[in-house]
Amino acid sequence: MLEISGLTKRYATGDLALTDVSLTVPDGQVMALIGPSGAGKSTLIRCVNRLVEPTAGRVVLNGDDITALGPAALRRARRRMGMIFQEYALVERLSVMENVLSGRLGYVGFWTSWFRRFPQKDVTEAFRLLERVGLDHMVDKRADALSGGQRQRVGIVRALMQNPELLLVDEPTASLDPKTSRQIMRLIVELCAERGLAAIINIHDVALAQSFAQRIVGLQGGRIVYDGPADGLTPSVLTTIYGEEDWSKTIAAVEDDAETELAG
C-alpha cells in the first residue's frame, strides 16, 4: 500500500507545484492521475520515488517512510518502485534482452552487470516476461530498431524485472497511436492485476483513463480536485479539472469504447 500525506513541493523559483496532497493507493489498484499541463502530475510521481525531493509531507510504501530514508536506503527502496517513462529511457544500442536485464542492476554486483553475467533465474524471468508481452521473438534486436509500442513494452518488462511493489507510469501513451495506446494501457492493467501491483499512471488522455483505470485522481494547480471512480467524471467535474469545454463528446467516446470492448 502507498500512503501519501500532506505532500507539498515548492521549487527554488518559488513556484508551488503540489499543495498538501494526501491519498492512499492499495495493492492491486490502478489509479490514473489526470489534469492540465502544469497541474503537478509528473511532480507527484517523481516525489514518490524522490527523483524530486518533496518540500513537506510523507510518502510511505508498505510501512517504510520513503521521505525519511538516507541515500543508501533510498537506492534500495527505489528497487521496489518500477518506473515506466514516456520516452522509454532505453539504451538504444543495447538489445531488448540487455535493456530488460538492466532492471536487475539494483540487485546484482557491479562486475556482474559490467560483464552482463546475470543469474540464470533473472534471464529465465526476462524470457518469461518478454513472452508475456509478445516480444520473445525480439530478444536480440537493438532497441533503436523497435517501434514506439514495442519500446514501451520493453520499458514495462524492465520495470517488472525489479519485482516492484508499486508502478509509477509517466505518460505511457503520449507518443503512441490510438490503437497502440489502448494495447499498452490494457497490458499495464492486466499485469497489475496478475501481480497485485498498485500503479499510478500520469496520463493526458481522459478517455483512456476512464476506460482502463479503476480510480481517477484529478489535479488542478497542485491540489486534488477529484478522487473517485471513472464514471464520476461528469462534465462539471471535468470543467473543474480542466476548465470550460464541451465534455459531452469525451464522455460519449468512453461509452462507445466500452460498448466496443464488450462486443469484442
Image (cartoon, grey):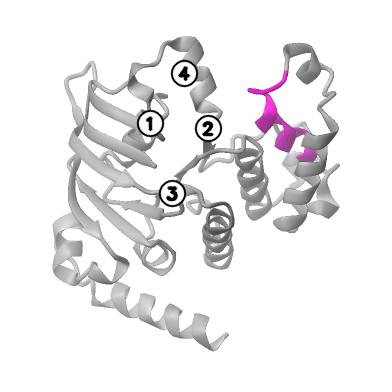
Measuring 46% from the left and 18% from the top, which residue is drawn there? 74
Q: Which comes before the other along the chain, label 1 or label 4?
A: 1
The 10 Å Cα crowd at callout 4, few under 14, some 14 to 19, many 20 or more, is some
Residue at position x 51%, y 39% from top? 165
**Image label count:** 4
Mark 3 closeness class: few <14, some 14–19, many ≥20 residues within 10 Å? some
| Dot 3: element | loop
Residue kind at label 3, given as amino acid type: Asp
- 1 vs 4, front mark: 1
Q: Amino acid at mark 4?
A: Leu
- Of badges 3 and 2, nearer the viewer stands 3
- Residue 258, image quadrant: bottom left
Quadrant (top left/top right/bottom left/bottom right) for the C terminus: bottom right
> What label does residue 74 carry, if any?
4
Label 2, on which residue? 80
Residue depth check, mark 2 versus mark 1: number of the one nearer the observer = 1
- Mark 2 and mark 1 lie on one chain; the one further toward the N terminus is 1
| Residue type, mark 2 in image | Arg
User: Residue 152 at what x, y percent from top left?
Assistant: 61, 48
Whichever of labels 4 and 2 marks the residue nearer the N terminus, that label is 4
Q: Residue at x 52, y 18 (%)?
A: 75
Q: Amino acid at mark 1?
A: Gly
The residue indicated by pointer 3 is 27
